[in-house]
Image: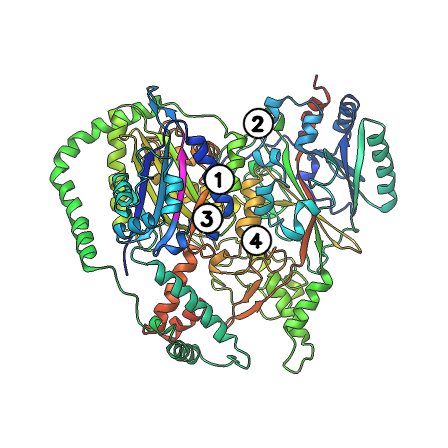
Amino acid sequence: MPHQVAITIHAPIRAGSAADLRELLAELGRKGAHDGAIPFGELPGVHFARFFVLDQVGDLDGRPIPASLVYLSDVDAPLDRHLRQLAGKADVLDQVFGYCEDYPVAVPALGARVAWLRRHVVSSAVTYVNTVGRGLDQIRQEARLREAIQDFLDEPGRDWAGRSPTEVRREVRRFVASRPDLARAMSPPRRPGIVFRVRETAHKIALPLVVLVLSPALLVALPAWAVLLRWHERRDEEETKRPDPMLVAELTSYEDHVVQNAFTAVGFVKAGLFRRLTMRIVLAGVSYAVRHFYNAGSLAGVRTIHFARWVPIDDGRRLFFASNYDGSQESYMSDFIDRLAWGLNAVFSNGHGYPRTRWLVKGGAENEQAFKNYLRNHQLPAPVWYSAYDNLTADNVAANARIRAGLHADLTPAQTADWLALL
Amino acid sequence: MTTKTSTKLDLHDIQGLVARGYGSLPVACYLLFAVADRRAAQAQVGRWAEAVANAGSGHREAATHVAFTATGLAALGLPEDSLAGFSAEFLGGMAAPHRARQLGDVDEADPARWQWGGPANPQVDGVVLLYARDEQELAERERSAAGALTGNGLRLVKRLGTERLTDREPFGFRDGIAQPAVAGLGSAGNGQAVAAGEFVLGYRNGYGQLTDAPALARNGTYLVFRQLEQDVDGFWRYVEDATRRPDGSVDDDRREQLAAKMVGRWRSGAPLVLAPDHDDPARAADNAFGYHDTDPTGLACPLGAHIRRANPRDSLDPDPGTAKSLAVNDRHRLLRRGRAYGPEPRGLHFICLSANIARQFEFVQHTWLDNPNFRGRYDDTDPLVGSRLPYGDTFTEPAAPVRRRHVGLPRFVLPRGGGYFFLPGISALRSLAELP
């Protein structure tokens, strides 16, 4: 199975066309990404995708940043395949990216489009994947597997009363093996490629080594950093405004249509070298943690996030965060506050206007209303948003994988009973 | 910042409905009204300030309460900047499109089809809630209240009657057992007390913080009102049909059992966790239980049962079975004050009080009750009150060796009206009366 990659394409919009592009995206969103306005479903391996517009703004020094278009997708590797396939949807692509500077509208060649897309790819500082290596095909097959087993259990005339879990499992296995469309589930999914695994292992070892080598210098710097941190934390200004009801109305109009929602937010990094550097280091740490430890179903106890990323843009002056999560934004924010406040604080407290933190990880998101207001204030509408499995929570996807795993694992009677309880 | 010190509530400034559900005042009715003339209405609000029962006063023969919608506060002349300090949910109203989707109020339950509170209905600016010991007393109260409305710049929009209070809700189950104990309110409720600020504005909430609100909101709270019509016959017909023996005959025991599995309690109120096999009236009011240690997989009380959704107790991540889990649960509690109506159509005038509508009422409704993917399920909304929309018409009864799956559940509860109200403190009522 392939590993997953987060693609970000970020391109300036031609002067004066941002409003038209917004209009177009809203129109495409109304038609529904699922009904073919943008045929993400025809592109293999796309888990989630979205388009949004970043309006023209002045940065913290008042310098203008032009409006830009952002395209995000979480896809099965390789990245190039996705870019080529995306470029193959020329009619839609031209319509949307045609608002961007230098986009080769008049050029019929696929290569020109792919080259343009590739030129505008931006890398994430952090990419979170709920379960690394679980590809779209696997997710879909395992969802079908579960449904088929459910129906099998309820076939008329079957009575499981009095049967042992082991007997029931034996019959389920026999049923799955007898169905050509499901039989693949009798063996474990393939793991990501060897190149990927070697690279990940090397990275897992290399970073601590680098830190170890640098540790004398870091230890010397740490007290000074801590003093500076507290000085900044006391001085940095908090944003206190409540979210504009018009913005909230627009944002919520896109929420809670299916089991997942998209979250997108952008903000300025606080001025000065200290915050920029702190953010870089924290993001590197978070990236390491999600890449090597939080890569199998849970982000430090939060199991509702499918994909997430932090992406620095505009030469590091701004940072955006984007995620695909289960349930309402209210429950998402509650998860953040109750379970992940420390992690969010470490990153976002380097963002301009964030609720005041203490020692980088305390306070901040623990200040419920200030945090909820901050997120809404910085959130962006994503009118075009696609999910390949919009009725499945991350929990469901994981349970489906466990159902499959239970078909070919050695299970004790107690484990067999637990396995049957997944159904 | 979190303080664990005892909470001193300004009981004489808090409307008594926060402290009590008036079990001793079994008859009640609700009068929805609109403001027609601001000045005259303000004078009436001033009289209400003297008349409403407060949380500090003792036994009463009757009680009057009054609450306002956002349009009502505006109609009384509350300045825009003060109004804007109220929560976004309250200001947007229950029938706003996104909210209706979150609450499952779509299709048949669309606010456009409501009998009150919807976009097609006359504007509701407030509600008077009347409680009395008997029908005669209520009739007198109602006459004078109705007179107070019409003669004083207010217009009666709709009267909502209730059935005489019993301990049963219309489906036939004992109701109102699990109420949160509120810090500083003493007697009511059971278990660990929940921070007063979860139910009264102006005090520290479950995060040890003050919920955003304008100064006027101190000692007030939000009142969520939903008229929920219950298809009692449909419910019992469904469980009877779903449990017939292979020869088609009715299986009384299985019928009662399936109904209890859907609710999480037997008719008497006895919880399935403590009485898994049959009803046990001796446990009728039993409420001292958790789920995680005794029944983690739901073999006794299904994970999707109504009471296990509405109040998951200690079964929540990240550490089920611990105080941490209970603390998360406690930030999503509701003080329920509803009453049944009937006889036909029948249902519940659901009323709950909370300081944060989004984190309490809306969260419980959307994330727990009406969530088809709740607790790892795929297609199960609350078997009793779920909307089944856009999907979610399955009920899963955990069993050994294999679950019993019930598909195609009809909707048994249909919202017919509703609104978000603000239940002001007594001095806030005076302030409203004196607005320039």
Distance of mark 2 from mark 3, alpha carbons?
Answer: 40 Å
Q: Relative to the observer, which residue lies in front, A138 or B354?
A: A138
What residue is drawn where x is 73% and y is 22%? B433
Q: Amino acid at mark 4?
A: Asp
Distance of mark 2 from mark 4, alpha carbons?
Answer: 29 Å
Image location (x, y in percent) of residue B234: 70, 64
Query: Do circles 2 and 4 both sit on a common chain?
Result: yes
Q: Relative to residue A213, is residue B263 drawn left or right?
A: right
Determine contact: label 2, label 4, CB under 8 Å: no
Distance of mark 3 from mark 1, alpha carbons?
Answer: 11 Å
The part of the image, by quadrant, that contains residue A122 is top left
Q: Relative to the observer, which residue lies in front, A266 or A26?
A: A26
Query: Do circles 4 and 3 both sit on a common chain?
Result: no
Determine contact: label 4, label 3, CB under 8 Å: no
Secondary element at image label 1: helix
Which residues are the magenta region? A49-55
Distance of mark 4 from mark 1, alpha carbons?
Answer: 28 Å
Residue named by callout 4:
B370
Residue named by callout 1:
A26
In front: label 2 or label 3: 3
Whether residue B86 is visible to the viewer of this picture, yes or no, is yes
In front: label 4 or label 3: 3
Verify whether residue A324 appears in magenta: no
The subunit letter for the residue under badge 2 reads B
Secondary element at image label 3: loop
Residue named by callout 2:
B85
Specify the label residue A37 is tagged with.
3
In front: label 4 or label 1: 1
Q: Relative to the observer, which residue lies in front, A235 or A309?
A: A309
